[in-house]
Image (cartoon, rainbow, N blue to C red):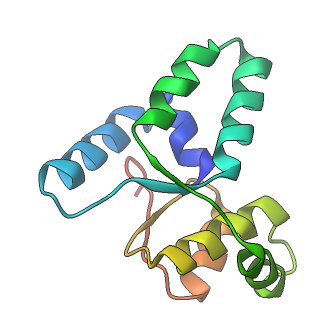
């Protein structure tokens, strides 16, 4: 899961309910582990600081996810992804998902979605058509 998705679990946005329902169904069905790259923690904590969300809420959300450490090969793979407009942190999330063998990638960032689909990830954006 990308930060654009996990942030919706902290801030009530238009897609929050659909995302929560999607994740609840995946977990209840036993066919998904909720996973993100370790850089998620920094991104969420900075977002919380900017928006006034309590850090305890961030800690709670992070405790529900498997947060993966990233070795140097993830950084190399991220740097080699195609897409001139793909931002570095977005590329790192995609490369981490690939390395983890993710069968689904959740993002609400259009540029990241395009890049993730280009490398074969199945992208979902619950609450958007």
- Horizontal side of 6 relative to 74 (left or right) equals left
- Horizontal side of 76 relative to 39 (left or right) equals right
Residue 11, visible in the rendered structure: no
Percent across and percent down for residue 33 are 33, 58
Identified at 71% across, 76% down, the residue is: 74
Percent across and percent down for residue 128 are 43, 52
Identified at 73% across, 18% down, the residue is: 51
117 or 75, nearer to the observer: 75
Work out which residue is located at the far left of the displayed protein and give it. 29
Percent across and percent down for residue 114 are 63, 75
- Horizontal side of 121 relative to 92 (left or right) equals left
Q: How many marks?
A: 0
Residue 110 image-quadrant placement = bottom right
When the figure is inspected, residue 6 is found, relative to residue 122, above or below; the finding is above
128 or 67, nearer to the observer: 67
Residue 112, visible in the rendered structure: yes
Identified at 69% across, 22% down, the residue is: 48
Q: Quadrant of the C terminus?
A: bottom left
Residue 11 image-quadrant placement = top right
């Amino acid at each position: 899961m990308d930060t654009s998705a996990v942030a919706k679990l902290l801030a009530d946005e238009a897609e929050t309910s659909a995302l929560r329902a999607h994740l609840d169904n995946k977990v209840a069905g036993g066919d998904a582990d909720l996973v993100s790259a370790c850089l998620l923690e920094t991104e969420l904590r900075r977002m919380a600081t900017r928006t006034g969300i309590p850090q305890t809420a961030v800690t709670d959300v992070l405790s529900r996810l498997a947060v993966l450490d990233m070795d140097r090969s993830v950084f190399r793979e991220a740097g080699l992804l195609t897409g001139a407009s793909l931002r570095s942190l977005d590329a790192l999330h995609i490369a981490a998902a690939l390395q983890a063998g993710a069968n689904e990638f959740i993002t609400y960032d259009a540029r990241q979605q395009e890049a993730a689909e280009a490398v074969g990830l199945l992208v979902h954006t619950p609450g958007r058509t």
